[in-house]
Amino acid sequence: TLAHTTGTAIVADAHAIHETPPAAVEVHDVHKWYGDHHVLNGVRLTVRPGEVTVILGPSGSGKSTLLRVINHLEKPEIGHVSLNGELIGVRRQGERLKELSERSILAQRGRIGFVFQNFNLFPHLTVLDNVAAAPVATGLLTKPEARELACELLARVGLADRTAAYPRQLSGGQQQRVAIARALALQPGIVLFDEPTSALDPELVGEVLSVIKDLADSGTTLVIVTHEIGFAREIADRVVFMDGGRVVEQGPPAQVLDHPKHERTRDFLGKVL
Ligand code: ADP
Ligand code: MG
């Protein structure tokens, strides 16, 4: 009957609403100053689970600071960040409303992988131990479990045969792939990349982008700061363009990259393309 059908539809709708997961990352009107320098000026950003967000913008626009705020390496003076619906470091008009304990911040940070421009591997540890160290140190896994996981992750980034090498014996592209495996070892819900290929020789960029592409295809939530526009077009669900500590525009790559609304976005794309 019609009544029955309508009833079912309503139930299905309610179910759908109920099942909508919280945003992986929600940045609410974040302001950050270094001294007098207003480095983040009211940034809002929502990252849905499984989405790939690419952040573009000129040097000094606040991209790295935004990643550091998301990862709780920096605290905003105003605004707040929530991860999977959990509010953190909430402040409004300078008033501290809620502060997460250091322990909760560490727990939250453990659920975020961070890959830096300069790899930041431990030089005195083998490739395997670079990847296995954190899950053991945090008590997530036993040493044998961590080593098994590290082997799997290193195979996934194409380095199964280099587990016993030290970072200095690897190319930049290989080191960055180790850094990605290391970031995955804590089984993070989200991975942040800060210009992962900027320090690499051009011929090594592709192997790192291809590993990131595999991660994206496997449904991992990613936020990537990069100047690789072609890669952004291929991989991003959403492109965010920042300038002067603000999000100037954001949207699907076809919109932001091919039909930018703002002069500053057009200028920037004209320079990097
Ligand atoms: P981007 O990653 O887009 O190049 P950043 O977030 O690194 O930009 O930096 C934004 C601005 O904040 C820059 O002008 C930079 O010099 C400044 N800045 C970044 N980190 C610090 C810091 N720890 N102390 C003071 N100024 C900083
Ligand atoms: Mg930066």
Image (spheres, helix red, strand yellow):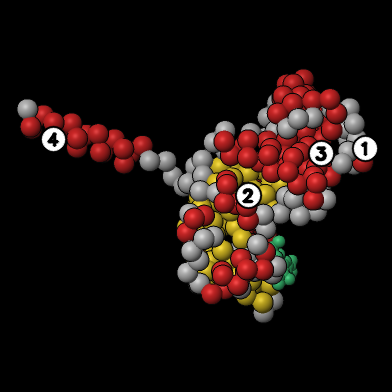
Report the front residue among 13 and 108.
13
Which residue is painted at 57% across and 47% down in the image? Answer: 234
Number of the label disc, if any, that sits on residue 261:
none
Q: Which residue is mark 4?
A: 6
- Regarding residue 199, the answer to whether it shows in the image is yes
Q: Which residue is mark 2?
A: 231
Secondary structure of the residue carrying numbered label 2: helix
Viewer-nearest of labels 4 and 3? 3
Q: Amino acid at mark 2?
A: Phe
Secondary structure of the residue carrying numbered label 1: helix
Mark closest to the chain's N terminus, 3 or 1: 1
Q: Amino acid at mark 4?
A: Thr
**Quarter of the image that includes the N terminus:** top left
Residue 150 point in image, percent of width and height? 75, 27
Q: Amino acid at mark 1?
A: Gln
Number of the label disc, if any, that sits on residue 169:
1
